[in-house]
Image (tube, rainbow, N blue to C red):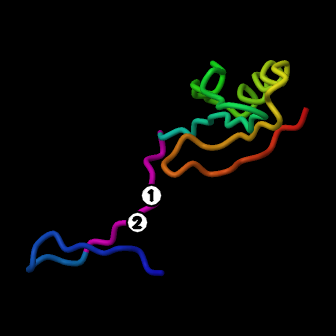
Amino acid sequence: MPPPMTMTAPDRELVVEHADAQPADTRTFFRLRAIMRQGTAASLPAVWERYATIDAARALVRGMYSNDRVLRVMIVTDEVPPRFVEWVER
């Protein structure tokens, strides 16, 4: 699928804008998503935080697994829609 194209004015040349183009200083943040045995993960504070590195997100998963209701935890990007990064096992 070709990238979307827009024209700035009828007499000017064609400008191509890539939909997934990001500035060089944009960082990818990560979030944690928990699969729960019962209820929702909204009561877990680690789910509401954004993490600058994937290692910081992995470090908090250990604390989440101390809750018996947490079955599995995945790391996703903080984008819309979120993109899957990895499952973190117990």
Left or right, 89 with reference to 23: right
User: Residue 18 appears in which quarter of the rendering?
Assistant: bottom left
Q: Position of residue 81 (x, y in %)?
A: 52, 52
The mark found on residue 18 in the picture is 2
SS at mark 1 in the image: loop
Q: Residues within 10 Å of mark 2 (few under 14, many from 20)?
A: few
CB-based contact (under 8 Å), mark 2 and mark 1: yes
Local crowd size for mark 1, using a 10 Å CA cut-off: few (<14), some (14–19), many (≥20) = few
Which numbered dot is residue 36? none
For badge 2, the amino acid type reads His
User: Image height check: is 58 above or below 10?
Assistant: above
For mark 1, what is the residue?
Answer: 21
Is the magenta region chiefly helix, strand or loop? loop
Name the residue type under label 1. Answer: Ala
Nearest the eye: 28 or 88: 88
Q: Give the extent of the magenta segment.
A: 15-25
Which is more toward the observer, 25 or 1? 1
* Relative side of 1 to 86, left or right: left
Count the numbered circles shown.
2
Q: CA distance from mark 2 to mark 1?
A: 5 Å
List x then y, in percent, for residue 40: 65, 31
Query: Residue 15 vs residue 51: left or right?
Result: left
Q: Residue at (8%, 79%) from the top-left corner?
A: 11
| Residue located farthest toward the front when viewing the structure as drawn | 38
Residue 17 falls within the magenta-colored stretch: yes
Q: Nearer the viewer, residue 59 or 2?
A: 59
| SS of the residue under disc 2 | loop
